[in-house]
Amino acid sequence: MEIRAMLADPSLKEKGFRLLMQRYGKALYWHIRRIVVSHDDAEDALQETAIKIFRSTDSYRGEGKLTSWIYRIATNEALQVLRKRAGLFHSIDSLSPQLLSTLEEEAQVDADKAVLALQKALIGLPSQQRIVFTMRYYDDLTYEEIAEATGKSVGTLKVNYHYAYEKVKKYLQENI
Amino acid sequence: MMEKMDNKSRQMPYSETEEYLDNLVSRVTDKAVEAGKTQKKSFRPLWIAASLAAAAAILLFVLIGRGVENTEGPIDKYLASLSDEELLQLTSYEIEEWEEADAYQIEY
């Protein structure tokens, strides 16, 4: 039976939710981690994401893709963490130095230089570009799915991805 | 350069193992189910309590409103019984002011 149908059936909701988390839980963790960088923050945001998914399955009418819906919740929770960190008077993008320092603290000592450089390049991007890039590059989501998850138009996302790609490429050329 | 990155198959530079993440997801899932059930159980009493509180507030408001309308204390009754002339005298009555020193002077 499909997860979507299970979530819609009250008697199978919990089973469907567990299956959903089993299938997408780790992907959601990495998606959040790529936005918030810190493991502790990623764990907290993943917890909130899971609670919101479970509580709002009743309101999920099956419109759009299930993956877009759960990525939307996860993205919102991750951004919420960053908003709290940034405070009232600063933008999320002002957190880049802090995120960079968290990356350096939490990355493995023997981490591959190119892999680490890519993460640094991503942190340097404006959050919108970073989210689009990671959803395309790591999660293989289509522009339509990302549009559903972020509420942005496909055209805007394509432009954001293009800018992100060029900036990342330039950074890697200069730093590897 | 990006092609070279593709060969790294989207690795992340962190130490969390697959096993660790499986446990994390499982823990997070259990907590979410627990939180969801707790919310559902506590929803009805909370809803009932909120409704009762709202009803009590409305009742109190209505009663106080009526009370204010109907209440006529002894002063109101007294003032109502006065003629216009008497009322004028009352408002023009000057209170004799005592000097502070006099007021606190204790006579033996």
Image (cartoon, rainbow, N blue to C red):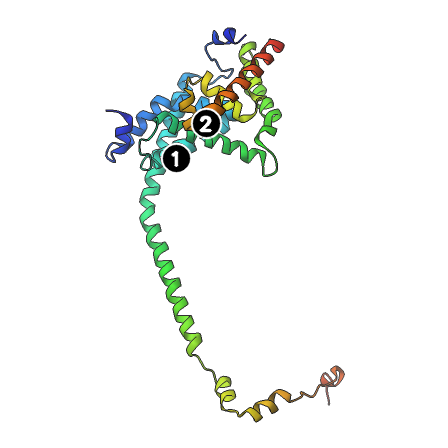
Element carrying mark 2:
loop
Residue in the image at 61% along x and 35% along y:
A90
How far across and down, in percent of the image, does residue B60 sit? 40, 67
- Residue A153 shows which numbered tag? 2
Could you give the CA–CA distance between mark 1 and mark 2, rounded to whole angstroms?
Answer: 25 Å
| Quadrant in the rendering for residue B27 | top left
| Quadrant in the rendering for residue A170 | top right
| Quadrant in the rendering for residue B20 | top left
Q: Residues within 10 Å of mark 1 (few under 14, many from 20)?
A: some
Q: Residues within 10 Å of mark 2 (few under 14, many from 20)?
A: few
Say if B24 sits above or below B5 in the image: below
Residue of label 1: A52
How far across and down, in percent of the image, does residue A43 sit? 46, 28
Q: Chain of mark 2?
A: A
| Residue A38 seen in the current view | no
Residue in the image at 41% along x and 67% along y:
B61
The amino acid type, in three-letter code, at marker 2 is Ser
Element carrying mark 1:
helix
